[in-house]
Image: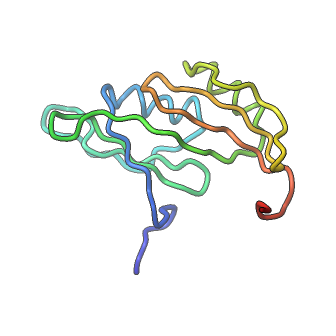
Amino acid sequence: MHIPPNFNTVTPYFFVHDAQAFVRFLIEGLAGVETCRTLRPDGQIANAQIRLGGSTVMVSEATAHYPAMSASYYLYVEDADAAMKRALDHGATLEMAVADMPYDDRQGGVRDAHGNLWWISQRLIDAPYSA
């Protein structure tokens, strides 16, 4: 099996209304880096690829055939407090304040303008989750 660099076996693919604004949030609000963009003939985003840390997500403008949908994502970051502030400064709304969790993550949650939940998490120890 061949998987492109910075992709994972499962890669989130967002279908949203106003994909331009969503890509801007991923870059400005979540510190993403755009690596690729193709446009449809009408100028809307057919596919944009945004790298978030070591993972890539894909974004397309929603259509009648592929309607907008929201989901929940767990995003590991170096500094949960700084990442939370950045997301809020770029239009996200607070779901849960950052706090130390019993499973050794420092975590908070935000909702982006497209309805997606982002659980912003900083791993506090260099160890797997324990049962």
Q: Position of residue 73 (x, y in %)?
A: 54, 43
Q: Quadrant of the N terminus?
A: bottom left
Q: Is residue 128 above or below residue 95?
A: below
Lateral position of residue 56 relative to residue 110, left or right: left
- The quadrant where residue 4 appears: bottom left
Q: How many marks?
A: 0
Q: Position of residue 35 (x, y in %)?
A: 44, 50
State the colouring used for the structure image: rainbow
Q: Position of residue 125 (x, y in %)?
A: 86, 56
- The quadrant where residue 75 appears: top right
Q: Quadrant of the C terminus?
A: bottom right
Lateral position of residue 56 relative to residue 29, left or right: left
Q: Position of residue 119 (x, y in %)?
A: 63, 38
> Residue at the spot x=30%, y=33% of the render?
68
- The quadrant where residue 79 appears: top right
Lateral position of residue 63 relative to residue 21, left or right: left
> Residue at the spot x=59%, y=57% of the render?
54
> Residue at the spot x=60%, y=38% of the render?
31
